[in-house]
Image: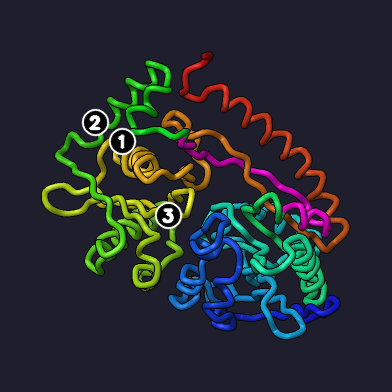
Amino acid sequence: MQSEGAATLTVAQSLDTFTPEEWASLSGTTREGSEPYNPFVSRAFLKALEDSGCATGKTGWLGQHLRLESADGTLLGAVPCYLKSHSQGEYVFDHGWADAFERAGGRYYPKLQVSVPFTPATGPRLLVSRNARPEAVRSALAEGLRTFADRLGISSVHVTFVLPEDMAALENAGFLRRTDQQFHFFNEGYASYDEFLGTLASRKRKALRKERRAALEAGIEIDWLTGSDLTEAVWDDFFAFYMDTGSRKWGRPYLNRQFFSLIGETMAEDILLVMARRGGRYIAGAINFIGSDALYGRNWGCIEHHPFLHFEVCYHQAIEFAIAKGLKRVEAGAQGEHKLARGYLPVTTCSAHYIAHAGLRRAVADYLERERRDVAAIGEMLAEHAPYRKGP
C-alpha cells in the first residue's frame, strides 16, 4: 500500500498471510514474551474466527489486516482490521453517527474496524514486533490506517478497546478519543475468596454469602473445566447454553459451533469453562479466557433458570479462579452496574476514531467531549458506591 523509508505497509485479507512464527513475534500474542499475554490477539483466536466463518466477508467482517515489513521482508508490526458493512458485534456503538451521516446524504458504510470481533476486552491493537522500535512502528501503523481509509474513500476508522500506548499513537495521527466504562475485579494478593470478602463492608459481605448459598441450593455443583477437560461433549453442552441465551438476548448469536471446536483444539489451556451441574447434567456455563495476568469473562448461557446462578457462575467463580491462580484482575465484559456490588470496580475504557468528513468529524468531536465528561462523572459516582470498607 505505501512505503515509509525502508518499511512497506501492505494489506492482507486473511491471518494465513502471517506465518505462526511471524505472528508469535508480535508483542502480547503469546506467553513467550515478557509483556502481558492477551489471548484475543493470539493467532489461534483470530484464525478461529476466520476459519469458522464467524468473521468473514459474508458476515460483514472482511479481513483487511495491515502488515508492516522492513526492506528485507521482516515483519515489524501488524493490525487486525476488518472492512465492516454494519456496526454489530463491536460493543462501542456508532449507530447514531451512521444514521446522522446518511440522513445528511453521506455514506457511512463500509468502514474500517480495528478490533477483535465480538470481544469487548482491552488489548494490543497496533501490534509491534519485539525486535522493532515500538513508538516508530505504532506511529507508522496509525498513519497507515488513515492513509488506507483515505485511499479506499471510506467514512471512518474505529479502533476499539485500546491500550494507552496505542491510544497515544492514534491521537497523534488525528484520531478522536472516546471513553466508556467496564467493571473489573482487582486481586490485591488475596489468599482466598474469604480474604477478599473480609475487605467488604459487613452488610455487603453478608449479602454476597447469602447470594452464593441461594445460587446453589437447588443441588447445583460447579466445575472448572480447562485443557483436556474441554471435550466435544462439553462444547455441545456449552453451545446449547450459548444459543439459548444468546438468541433471546441478541436475536442472533455471533459465534457458531465450529468456532468452539477450533479454540478447543488450538488454545484449550487458555480457556476456562465454569459449568453448573444439577442432577447429573450441565445446565449452565460461562466461558472465560486466561491471559498471563487477567481472566477475561465472555459468554454465558443456561437451559435452566435459578436465582443468582448467573452471578455465581460469571462473577464469584471468576474471582475465586483469579485468586487461586494469582491473576491480577478479572475483566467481566461489557457494561453491567450490577457487578459493582460483587466486588468489581468501574474502569474507563478507550477507543479511537478517525472521521474523514470534516463536518461529521466536528460533530462527533463535540459529542465525544461531552460524553467523556459524563463517563468520568459517572465513574466517580459509582466508585463511591463500591462495596469495600471505607477508611483504614
State the residue at coordinates (72%, 39%).
372
Judging depth in this view, the residue of 61 and 328 nearest the camera is 328
Picture disc at residue 353: none
SS for callout 2: helix
State the residue at coordinates (78%, 41%).
369
Q: Position of residue 337 (x, y in %)?
A: 50, 34
The stretch in magenta equals: 167-187
Q: Is residue 210 left or right of residue 337?
A: left
Query: Which amino acid, mark 3?
Result: Ile
Label 3 vs label 2, nearer the camera: 3
Q: Residue furthest right?
A: 358
Question: Is disc 2 in contact with disc 1, using a CB cutoff of under 8 Å?
Answer: yes
State the residue at coordinates (65%, 53%).
162
- Give the residue pinned by disc 3: 290
SS for callout 1: loop
Q: Is residue 188 above or below residue 28?
A: above
Label 1 vs label 3, nearer the camera: 3
Picture disc at residue 308: 1
